[in-house]
Structure formats: C-alpha cells, structure tokens
Amino acid sequence: MSDIAIRVEHLAKRYSIGAGVESYRTLRETLGQLARAPFGRGRTRSAAAHIWALDDVSMEIKKGEVVGIIGGNGAGKSTLLKILSRITTPTRGRARISGRVGSLLEVGTGFHPELTGRENIFLNGAILGMARREIARKFDAIVAFAEVARFIDTAVKYYSSGMYVRLAFAVAAHLEPEILIVDEVLSVGDAKFQQKCLGKMDDVARTGRTVLFVSHNMAAVQRLATSALLLEGGCLAGTGPVRPMVARYLGGHAHARYQAGRRTGRPQILEAQLVDAFGQPVAKPLNTETFGFRIRFALPQSRSGIRLGIGVLTGDGTVVFTSGSDDVAIEVPADAREYEARVMVPGDTLLAGDYHLAVCLWDAGETLDLQEPALSFALEYGPSVLYASGDNRKGFVNVRCGWTLEPALSLVGLP
C-alpha cells in the first residue's frame, strides 16, 4: 500500500428503517410493565425494513489524488465518507486507510459544544495526533481564516451555523492531515467564504495530500478534482477522469421537468419547467427563439434575504452562464408562501445543443436548496445565418461581435 491512501474492499452498510424506538421509561413504569406481563406476553414489536446505503463498493485512491464523489440524493456518498472517517462502521467489507484523516462532514461533527473555539482547536489537533506546539503554530492562521477572532473564547454552542462551519473547515484544512475528507458542508457560508474554502482545498491538494469531497456543485468538482467517483443507489457506478464522470452523472439524471418529491419544511425549490416566450411548456425550443424557465419555490417561514439563481450547463457540466435575482435587483419577498419566477433567455443567445439547468435558493449565510441538474433540455437550430453551412457550429454561445471590413491602405515602398 505504499502509494495507496485508501483501499475499500466490498464495503456495504445496512440501515434499519421503520423500527419502533422505545422511549425512556421511569423505574415505576418498568416495574409496572413487568407486573402486567412478567414473561413478555402482550408486547408488540414494530417490524423493521432494511436499506443498503452502500452495497459491495470496492476502490483504490492513490496518495495525492483529489477525488470528487458525485451522485444523486441517497446514492450513499455521505455514508461512504462517514465510514472512511470512522464515524460509523460497515456492515460488510473493510476500508484500509494510510495516514491521519481530517474530516468535515456536517455542522456539529467533531466539536464539543460546551468548549470554546480555542479549546476545540486544540482538542481536534490532539485527536489528529498533533503535539500542542504544532497546533499552537497553526492557531493564528486557523482563527484568521475562520474570521472568528472576537468569539474564539466563546463556547461554540453559541456560534451561528456559518461561524461554526468556518472554524470547523479551518481546523480540518490547517492541521495538516494526510487525508482531508469534506462533505457538502461548504453550502453553509457566503459566496466569498466558499471561494476561500475552494482556494484552500487547492492549496491542500498541491502539497500532495489526498482529498475526498462530496459536492452537488459540478463546477467545483471539475475545478478541484483530478478524478471522480460516481455512486448510484449505494453502488459504485464508475470511476475515472472528472469530465466524463460528470457528463455520465448529469446525463443519467436527465429529465424535462423537475418536481420535488416531498416537502422539507425549509425554503425549497418545488418545480422547474422549460417554457416558451409565452410561458407555455415547450419540449425543444429553437435556439433563435426566446425561451426560459418557470420556477416555483416555497418559503415555509417568513425569511428575508433569500436569493434565487440559475445556471445553464453543457452536457459535460461546463457552466455556460449563471443568472440571479440580484443581477436585476429583484428582491424575493420575505412572506411565508409559495412564489413563481420566470427567467427568460433571449433568442440567438445559445447555440443548438444539449444543456442542463441548475437552480439554487440561498441567502447570505447558506445554500438552502440546490438542484443540479434540475432539468435537461435540447435546443434545435433555427433559421439563422449561423447555420447556413450546416449544424456543426462550434461553441456554446452566440456573441454578436462588431465587424468592419474595408480596403487596406497601401504602404509606401511596397509593391
């Protein structure tokens, strides 16, 4: 295993669902129950079903690799990271890890709420096996990165979710584990801090350390990862170069309309649909015609500062353009109710081809809902001089460049 950081062999994890959970009972209630049914007669037990969050996953990750783990909701991504971080144990199989692991899986993991930020930094460093002087050498850089200097001696249970995850990421990235494991926690935090995190992960990768991260943001995966691992339904669907894996993931989730499966009780994207210039559903618009997206979303509680945005991606996940409510100074109302937005794309903007739509709800502190891809669509080429010589024009967008053409002035002394 000299050049192997992680070796996973036939890994599987089973969870029970629907099992009855017995609540806490007092001593009097327990004795009363025994008196009524001393040998267990009359007791009922809820039947439990089982799901395999992971099923027979095998892989190898070399030292120094940056691996993006992608897949839909319920694919098993977070379960895999929890097993690799030793937070949960597998039902079958094993994972062999060479090196110290620093992980950031979800807000709340790894910090003791009653301890201050300062104490948690030293506690986490000690868990990683670092000497106190090593942690002290990194302390100022961690606090500066997390931007929590004023609150470093405050118990972290009083931190906002944004402060918490900033400090947690700073600790995980600065204390120099050989393997850094990061889940989709970077959805918490403003855009500026997310860029800082991506930059820090770049720095970590350049030092030769191994990085595994889960993200629904395909642009971040393609920016950071040297390879990708695709999970589907708890099984390993493929591994390989980033771009083909992202294209396979997006293509496998292609659908003409998005509709949420259930209500979450949080700000949520409920529906997204491709529409024509008149707001009517359309299957394959012409690229020369105006088309757009109808997006319905819900705010279950009153909340100010919400933003809505979209991104249009190519078939392999390359971002063509993004647009947000802030771009046109539209404020999302704070009242608790459902809203509908239409985002229209002028004709002759995109070239003909296959595309995906990402839709995001966020505020200054966190990403509230991200659907990528929310839907997939194709643009047919319309009557345009762009396609006068065929439909194989290269590129994604039509840029209306300014052109001039006139006779060149003769240069003195040249024939």
Image (cartoon, grey):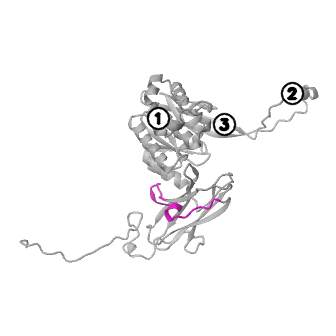
Q: Quadrant of the C terminus?
A: bottom left
* Image coords of residue 176 (percent x, y): 45, 31
Q: Could you tell me which residue is drawn at 48 percent across and 57 percent down?
A: 315
Magenta range is 312-334
> In the image, is residue 349 above or below residue 335?
below
In the foreground, 394 or 73: 73
Q: Secondary structure at mark 2?
A: helix
Label 2 environment density (alpha carbons within 10 Å; few <14, some 14–19, many ≥20): few
What numbered label is drawn on residue 14? 3
Q: Is residue 327 magenta?
A: yes
Q: CA distance from mark 3 to mark 2?
A: 31 Å
Direction front: furthest residue: 150
Mark 1 lies on residue: 142
Q: Could you tell me which residue is drawn at 90 percent across and 29 percent down?
A: 33
In the foreground, 413 or 67: 413
Label 1 environment density (alpha carbons within 10 Å; few <14, some 14–19, many ≥20): many
Amino acid type at mark 3: Arg
Q: Is residue 62 visible?
A: no
Sequence-earlier tag: 3 or 2: 3
Mark 1 or 3, closer to the camera: 1
Amino acid type at mark 1: Ile
Sequence-earlier tag: 1 or 3: 3
Q: Secondary structure at mark 1?
A: helix
Mark 2 lies on residue: 30
* Image coords of residue 364 (percent x, y): 54, 51
> In the image, is residue 234 above or below residue 6?
below
Q: Could you tell me which residue is drawn at 42 percent across and 63 percent down?
A: 396
Q: Could you tell me which residue is drawn at 34 percent across and 70 percent down?
A: 401
